[in-house]
Image: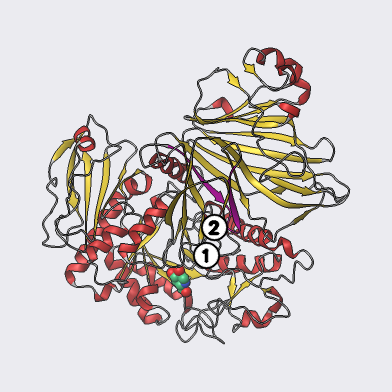
């Protein structure tokens, strides 16, 4: 169904809306009705007011249907620069005549509802704005996902001037808030310490979270955040907006508190070094900004995003099963040959996983990849290591009853490689300055269509010979970046690089729509929804110490569902028990990166059972609702749980992090259960011979009791790291 409100229809609309609208600053008669963008529990209302501008009137809990709306001409929805704007603009355009002013008036709105207006589907509202003096148009798109309470918004900029215009800032979204206080939770980090949460109160002025790293963009800052209104939000209370920019490149989130304590949020591509010259009639389409609003704390906001990601394409095939895998990176690093890999695949089958993932070090002949100094870009099997090629490895996997996956870093090149020798012009590097290496490598120029073809071919070749999974890595940022292909348009590099990458990923997905792929960037530096829609999971960190992983996985769980967060059991820290390491990895998408042949018989038996239990419980862990019960940021006793949508089953995790001598241990109250049902509790993941330690093991309680009184999930002894997993099954 399509509804159109062009300016000509305003006279007609005036009659009906006179009754509903009170517009204090302007004559009512001229303006069309407010535009409500709504989900099941959230309303975003925009209205046309003073000077025919579009204003944001309301964002918050759903308004009752037919409610009178007061339109304040206070917050222009998407603020252009150079006219009456006094703060951070959403868009700045330098016209062909050199003038840098823009005014945006409402033109029309188009609402695309699902056929039959089925509640539960997405509705897209597109509002067209235009400058009364220059032929520039801006389309604001909002897709409202009804059941998930998520709104996705993006912007298109188009002009019909005689010569190109230059865009110097171009936000995806601008949102406005009026609260007494604003509290920001941001997630930052570095290699090995990703997604660390930091909370702060926003004060007058502007707070910017951004990156200028180009490729490994989210290395230090992530494009996902919580914004709490009026007071800090916790897991179960407080008004909070969760937002995430879907862009695998430079991003910028700006939070500006103005002179009247209003907050203006703008989210989009970082305009740093990225003035974009736009020819006439070619739309500039910004990345999507995804957000949800919760009046009951961060937990609900996370669950909304998780549901959206799984069901609405935030991650590829988000509701489908995914393989549990054994990776060889930490087990062998570059040191392996065909016989060793054949053996590892046998081990993978014994462990009970679905797939073996061969990591870095399998390619390069003139410059064999025996370390990170050479060979990157030469995607042919090293004959001395793998005389029978990848084909043989696929065959071995098939014989073992599992699948075979492979590591690629197709956007990168070592200068010491045949690729670099053959195509020096495909590499981003300054022509007249010293080489700026990082991990001995350089970035290929994905703005160049020939490089896009090469990267596509690299991936396609593997997938066309039976490889059933790809780990797509990206181990450096863009620095000293210069594109021979772009010539004078160097300021397009950061944007066109990402567009080139998406072009490749589109082609990969057209040809191989369902092959699972892991998005990795030397750890979690590409954990964002622009890339993730082409991938089934991401690698959160190279740091697989289970204690550290509790924090890292907790951080990412705020924005990403468990089936996207790859968590591997490794030997990074052998001081930690195998049980603790396994229990922590079972909080996300379980995998292994361990020498199975070095396990004791008991360790192997434990792990086989853990894999079996995990597969049995994966529908709950992957598709259920996450409740974060006790945060590692607030104490030594950490707890979380997943509850199936029908509330028939739950998986509960308790981690004791360096519990102190005589530390008081209280029951943890569960959440999300059906109070009226009774649940049988069973402790799982016990080492052979180990007895269930939780007093609730084997008992049955009502959901009401479990949520009001709770159960013990932690040990009181001064033990360094212990853990428990409990299954709750409705009777
Ligand atoms: C960085 C990744 O994060 C690791 O998991 C591993 O794949 C190495 N690259 C391989 O070079």
From this view, report whether residue 264 is shown above or below residue 190.
Answer: above
Q: Please name the residue shown 85% across and 37% down the image.
A: 133
Q: Is residue 460 visible?
A: yes
Q: Is residue 303 left or right of residue 3?
A: left
Mark 2 neighbour class, 10 Å CA radius: few under 14, some 14 to 19, many 20 or more = some
Earlier in the chain: of badge 2 and badge 1, it is 1
Q: Is residue 439 magenta?
A: no
The image quadrant where one finds the C terminus is top left
Which quadrant of the figure contains the N terminus?
top right
The image position of residue 684, as x and y in percent, is 19, 53
Q: Residue at x 54, y 57 (%)?
A: 512
Q: Which residue is mark 1?
A: 463
- Where's residue 652, x and y in %? 25, 47
**Main SS class of the magenta portion in the image:** strand
**Residue under numbered circle 2:** 512
Res 122 quadrant in image: top right
| Picture layout, residue 403 above or below residue 164 | below
The CA distance from mark 2 to mark 1 is 8 Å
Start-end of magenta stretch = 239-257
Element under disc 2: loop
Q: Dividing the picture into quarters, in which one does residue 478 lie?
A: bottom right
Picture quarter with ligand 1: bottom left
For the residue pair 487 and 55, the one nearer the viewer reads as: 55
Question: Badges 2 and 1: C-beta atoms under 8 Å apart?
Answer: yes
């Amino acid at each position: 169904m399509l509804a159109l409100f062009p300016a000509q229809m305003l006279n007609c609309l005036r009659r009906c809306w006179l009754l509903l609208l009170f517009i204090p600053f302007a004559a009512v008669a001229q303006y069309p009705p407010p535009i409500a963008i709504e989900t099941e529990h959230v309303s975003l209302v925009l209205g046309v007011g003073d000077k025919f501008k579009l204003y944001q009137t309301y964002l918050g809990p759903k308004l009752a249907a037919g409610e009178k709306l007061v339109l304040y001409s206070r917050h222009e929805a998407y603020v252009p620069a150079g006219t009456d704007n006094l703060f951070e603009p959403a868009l700045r355009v330098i016209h062909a005549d050199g003038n840098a002013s823009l005014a945006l008036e409402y033109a029309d709105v188009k609402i695309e509802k699902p056929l039959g207006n089925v509640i539960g589907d997405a509705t897209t509202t597109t509002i067209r704005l235009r400058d009364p003096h220059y032929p520039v148009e801006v389309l604001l798109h909002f897709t409202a996902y009804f059941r998930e309470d998520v709104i996705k918004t993006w912007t298109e900029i188009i002009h019909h001037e005689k010569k190109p215009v230059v865009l110097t800032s171009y936000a995806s979204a601008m949102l406005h808030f009026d609260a007494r206080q604003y509290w920001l939770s941001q997630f930052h980090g570095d290699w090995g310490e990703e997604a660390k949460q930091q909370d702060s109160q926003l004060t007058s002025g502007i707070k910017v979270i951004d990156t200028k790293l180009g490729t490994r963009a989210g290395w230090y800052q992530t494009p996902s955040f919580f914004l709490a209104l009026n007071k800090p939000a916790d897991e179960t209370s407080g008004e909070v907006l969760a937002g995430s920019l879907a862009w695998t490149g430079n991003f910028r989130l700006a939070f500006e508190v103005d002179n009247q304590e209003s907050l203006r949020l703008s989210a989009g591509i970082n305009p740093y070094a990225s003035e974009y010259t736009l020819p006439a009639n070619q739309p500039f389409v910004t990345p999507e900004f995804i957000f949800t609003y919760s009046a009951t704390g961060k937990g609900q906001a996370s669950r909304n995003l998780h549901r959206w990601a799984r069901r609405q394409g935030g991650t590829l095939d988000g509701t489908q099963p995914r393989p549990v895998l054994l990776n060889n990176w930490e087990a062998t690093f570059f040191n392996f040959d065909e016989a060793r890999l054949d053996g590892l695949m046998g081990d993978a089958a014994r462990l009970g996983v679905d797939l073996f993932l061969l990591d870095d070090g399998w390619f390069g002949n003139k410059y064999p990849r025996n370390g990170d100094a050479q060979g990157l870009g030469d995607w042919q099997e090293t004959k001395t290591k793998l005389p029978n090629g990848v084909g043989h490895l696929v065959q071995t996997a098939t014989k073992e009853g599992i699948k075979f996956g492979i590591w690629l870093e197709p956007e990168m090149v070592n200068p010491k490689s045949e690729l670099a020798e053959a195509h020096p012009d495909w590499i981003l590097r300054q022509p007249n300055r010293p080489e700026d290496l990082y991990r001995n490598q350089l970035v290929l120029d994905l703005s160049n269509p020939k490089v896009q073809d090469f990267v596509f071919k690299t991936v396609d070749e593997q997938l066309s010979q039976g490889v059933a999974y790809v780990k797509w890595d990206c181990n450096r940022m863009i620095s000293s970046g210069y594109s021979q292909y772009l010539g004078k348009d160097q300021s397009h590099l950061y944007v066109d690089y990402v567009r080139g990458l998406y072009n490749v990923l589109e082609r990969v997905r057209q040809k191989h729509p369902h092959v699972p792929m892991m998005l990795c960037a030397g750890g979690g530096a590409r954990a964002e929804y622009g890339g993730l829609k082409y991938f089934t999971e991401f690698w959160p960190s190279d740091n697989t110490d289970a204690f550290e992983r509790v924090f890292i996985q907790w951080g990412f769980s705020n924005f990403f569902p468990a089936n996207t967060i790859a968590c591997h059991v490794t030997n990074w820290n052998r001081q930690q028990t195998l049980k603790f390491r396994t229990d922590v990895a079972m909080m996300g998408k379980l995998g292994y990166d361990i020498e199975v042949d070095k396990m004791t018989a008991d360790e192997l038996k434990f792990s086989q059972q853990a894999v079996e239990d995990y597969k049995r419980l994966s529908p709950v862990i992957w598709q259920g609702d996450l409740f974060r019960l006790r945060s590692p940021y607030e104490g030594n006793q950490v707890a979380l749980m997943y509850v199936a949508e029908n509330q028939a089953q739950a998986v509960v995790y308790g981690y004791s992090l360096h519990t102190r001598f005589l530390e008081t241990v209280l029951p943890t109250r569960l959440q999300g259960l059906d109070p009226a049902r009774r649940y049988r509790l069973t402790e799982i993941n016990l080492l052979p011979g180990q007895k269930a330690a939780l007093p609730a093991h084997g008992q049955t309680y009502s959901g009401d009791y479990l949520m009001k009184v709770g159960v013990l999930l932690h040990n009181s002894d001064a033990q360094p790291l212990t853990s428990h997993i409990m299954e709750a099954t409705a009777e």
